[in-house]
Image (cartoon, rainbow, N blue to C red):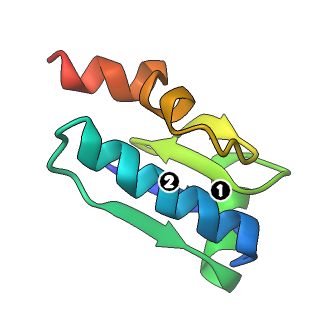
Amino acid sequence: MKIQVLGSGCPTCQKLYGITQKAVSEMGLKEKVEYLSGTEGMQALIEIGSMSSPVLAVDEKIAMTGFTPDIEKIKKLKRLNLVTRE
């Protein structure tokens, strides 16, 4: 599974990255969270088809757009939970 936070590098994107790392750790997943920012992040947003940032992507599909400071909401994302049950 590939978990990515895509964005411009702004403080909001950085917060989503930190909370996503914590959620993944608390869920017991072994995957690392990749953070793409700046030009690379903006290019990834275009490629994934998002006009907003930040984006939490799982296996190159949008799992969440925008920032939610609620770690429990991230843990409940369907895409992450499908992987933990496989």
Pointer 1 residue? 47
Q: Which element type, helix, strand or loop, lies under badge 1?
A: helix
Q: Quadrant of residue 41?
A: bottom right
**Residue at image coords 75%, 76%:** 10
Q: Can the viewer see residue 1?
A: no
Eyeballing the image, is 55 above or below 76? below
Q: Quadrant of residue 6?
A: bottom right
Eyeballing the image, is 44 above or below 41? above
Residue closer to the observer: 8 or 73: 73
Is the C-beta separation of discs 1 and 2 under 8 Å? no
**Residue at image coords 40%, 65%:** 34
Tell me how far mark 1 sits from mark 2, CA to CA: 24 Å
Q: Nearer the viewer, mark 1 or mark 2?
A: 2
**Residue 46, x across and y down, in percent:** 73, 59
Pointer 2 residue? 19
Amino acid on which the number 1 mark rests in the picture:
Glu
Q: Which element type, helix, strand or loop, lies under badge 2?
A: helix
